Amino acid sequence: MTRVPRPLLVAFAAITAAGFAACGGDDDTGGPASGATGTSVATSATSPTATPDPFGDFAALIYPQDLADGDSIGKAGAPVTLTLYEDFQCPFCLQLTLSYEEMLINEYVKTGKVLLQFRHYAILGPESEAAAAAAICAADQDKFWPFHHLLFLEQARQGQLKNEVINKGRFSDAALAGFAAEAGLDAAAYQSCVADPTTVQRLQADARDARQLGLRGTPGVVIDGQALGGAPADKASFRRVLDAAIANK
């Protein structure tokens, strides 16, 4: 595994210090957070809500399905692997997704520079776990990216950036089945997958990996297997870190 040079780690730490906050979990178990709040998202200088059409770029984003493989998307042989550990209920994960995913897909994934991976760190309770399990099942049908898109877009439209709501039915079993149908999943295969105990085991494996990387909350940003902290402050900062990692290969 290629390690990110220490100068890049220092640079990333500097540009994330003033960046997004994080949704926190239990210190040792990665379990549900006891006091996570999304209130600071609404006042962040980088918040997408500052624009007249805050979700336009993300809503219009078209994923290159020919480059998708489960919950990874990118060209074979991409020099850099970017892994994002997220929770679908976390408002800071939503902020990261709305702010950066269009850039990452169009500038780095489609151009063959970055392989983007999504990993689950479901720390905000039962609906986080249910959404993650559903997304794993969507990945099994190569529908992860449209499914992921629907879940985060729903959170955005429901106002999760301004007023965090968790475990109140937004990601109930029925709601998730509806998103699965909208994303084009086979219903029988989906229901069989979410009922399969191994799906929960796969979710738990992602959480173990997150903790082993030293991640204590979401979102978590990992480049080439090395955790670099939380989300960067802005697009320019993210580009600088990715471009430096690519240039170092």
Image: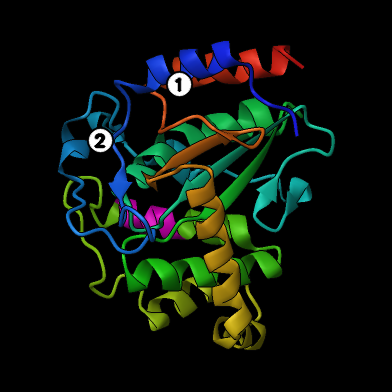
Q: Quadrant of residue 62?
A: top right
Residue 76 relative to residue 143: left or right: right
Q: Which residues are magenta?
A: 151-156
Q: For the view shown, which residue lies furthest in the front direction?
A: 28
Residue 20 relative to residue 69: left or right: left
The quarter of the rendered structure image containing the C terminus is top right
Q: Which mark is residue 235?
A: 1
Identify the residue shown where x is 24% and y is 45%.
161
- Give whichever of 201, 136 is nearer the camera: 201
| Type of amino acid at the residue the image marks with label 2 | Thr
- Give whichever of 6, 219 is nearer the camera: 6
Rendered view: 93 above or below 193? above
Q: Position of residue 124 (x, y in %)?
A: 31, 62
Rendered view: 236 above or below 226? above
Q: Position of residue 240 (x, y in %)?
A: 54, 13
| Type of amino acid at the residue the image marks with label 1 | Lys
Rendered view: 182 above or below 245? below
- Give whichever of 18, 168 is nearer the camera: 18
Judge the density around disc 1: few (<14), some (14-19), many (≥20) Cα neighbours within 10 Å. few
The residue that mark 2 highlights is 49
Q: Position of residue 32 (x, y in %)?
A: 30, 63
